[in-house]
C-alpha cells in the first residue's frame, strides 16, 4: 500500500502543471528588450543549477554528469585507436562569461550562444589499438580542459496542448562548439612514463585536429542530453509562463 501511495505521489508531481521557479526571471514577449531580458534570464537560471530542482526534472549541472557512454574510433597511417568514454562529468557550466539569446516567435526557434570561462571534462577511458608502433589496451581515466568554449545552440520548439493548456517541446535541436583551446591528460596509457608524456604532448600539440575529430560525435551527444533536460522543464511549465504575453 505504501509503495502504491509513493508511486501515485510521484505521478501527480510529474504530471502537475508548475509555474517557473520564483527565482527564475520572466520576460515580456513583445517588449522592446525581450531578447536582452531572455539572455539575462537564461544565464541566471543556468547559474542557479548548482543545486538540482527535482520537481522540474532539472539536475545539478555542477558538475553535469552524463548517463551515457561515448564511443569513438580514430585512425590514420600510423595510429588507430578505438575509444570509450564513460562516467563522464563536466564542471564549469555555471561559470558563464556571456549569454546571447533570441526567440523567433513565428518559427518557434530559440537561438542561444553561451560562452563559458572553461569546462573541465573527466571520465573513465578505455582504448584499444596502436600508437605508432606501440600497442594500446588500457582502462584508465582522462581529463580535458576546454578553454573559453562557446556553445551555439538551436532549439526547435513544437507547440502542443495538454488539458487545454499550451506547452512547448524541443525537437531536432542542434549544437556547435567553438573554443579557444584544449588540453588533454590521459593517465597510464603506456607502462613507460616517457611514452605517456610523449602521447599527451602529441595530443596537446594537435588539439585543433583532435577537436575536429571530436566534433563529429560530442556535440550530438551533448545536445541530446541538453534537449532532454530542457524538455523536463518544458513539459511541466506552460508556454504562457515561459514567455509572458504568449
Image (cartoon, grey):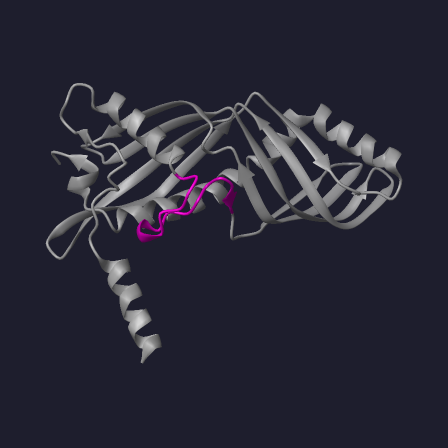
Q: Main secondary structure of the magenta part?
A: loop
Q: Measuring 54% from the left and 39% from the top, which residue is drawn there? A: 90
Q: Residue furthest front?
A: 2
Q: Nearer the viewer, residue 140 or 206?
A: 140
For the N terminus, the image quarter is: bottom left
The answer to whether 28 is drawn above or below residue 171 in the figure is: above
Q: Residue at x 27, y 46 (%)?
A: 234
Q: Position of residue 199 (x, y in %)?
A: 79, 33
**Residue 61 in the figure: left or right of residue 167:** right
Q: Is residue 198 above or below residue 4?
A: above
**Span shown in magenta:** 49-65
The answer to which quarter of the image holds residue 158 is top left
Left or right relative to 61: residue 123: right
Residue 27 in which image quadrant: top left
> Residue 33's spot in the image, x, y percent?
20, 19
Residue 56, magenta (yes or no) = yes
Left or right for 77, reference 63: right
Residue 229 image position (x, y, % from top left): 38, 46
Q: Residue at x 61, y 34 (%)?
A: 213
Give the left or right position of residue 141, taking residue 246 as reference.
Answer: right
| Image quadrant occupied by the C terminus | top left
Q: How many tags in the picture?
A: 0
Residue 122's x, y, as percent?
62, 41
Q: Is residue 52 magenta?
A: yes
Given residues 173 and 226, the one toward you in this image is 226
Amino acid at each position: 500500500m505504501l509503495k502504491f501511495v509513493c508511486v501515485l505521489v510521484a505521478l501527480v508531481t510529474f504530471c502537475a502543471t508548475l509555474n517557473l521557479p520564483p527565482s527564475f526571471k520572466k520576460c515580456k514577449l513583445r517588449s522592446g528588450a525581450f531578447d536582452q531580458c531572455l539572455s539575462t534570464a537564461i544565464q541566471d537560471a543556468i547559474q542557479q543549477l548548482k543545486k538540482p530542482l527535482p520537481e522540474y526534472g532539472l539536475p545539478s549541472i555542477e558538475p553535469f554528469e552524463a548517463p551515457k557512454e561515448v564511443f569513438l574510433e580514430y585512425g590514420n597511417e600510423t595510429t588507430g585507436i578505438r575509444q570509450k568514454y564513460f562516467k563522464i562529468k563536466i564542471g564549469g557550466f555555471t561559470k558563464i562569461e556571456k549569454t546571447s539569446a533570441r526567440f523567433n516567435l513565428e518559427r518557434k526557434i530559440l537561438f542561444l550562444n553561451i560562452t563559458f570561462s572553461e569546462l573541465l571534462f573527466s571520465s573513465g577511458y578505455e582504448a584499444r589499438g596502436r600508437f605508432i608502433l606501440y600497442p594500446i589496451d588500457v582502462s584508465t581515466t582522462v581529463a580535458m580542459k576546454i578553454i573559453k568554449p562557446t556553445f551555439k545552440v538551436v532549439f526547435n520548439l513544437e507547440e502542443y496542448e495538454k488539458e487545454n493548456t499550451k506547452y512547448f517541446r524541443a525537437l531536432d535541436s542542434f549544437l556547435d562548439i567553438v573554443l579557444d583551446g584544449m588540453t588533454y591528460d590521459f593517465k597510464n596509457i603506456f607502462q613507460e612514463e616517457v611514452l605517456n608524456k610523449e602521447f599527451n604532448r602529441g595530443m596537446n600539440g594537435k588539439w585543433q585536429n583532435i577537436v575536429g575529430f571530436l566534433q563529429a560525435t560530442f556535440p550530438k551527444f551533448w545536445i541530446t542530453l541538453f534537449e532532454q533536460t530542457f524538455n523536463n522543464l518544458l513539459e511541466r511549465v506552460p508556454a504562457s509562463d515561459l514567455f509572458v504575453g504568449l
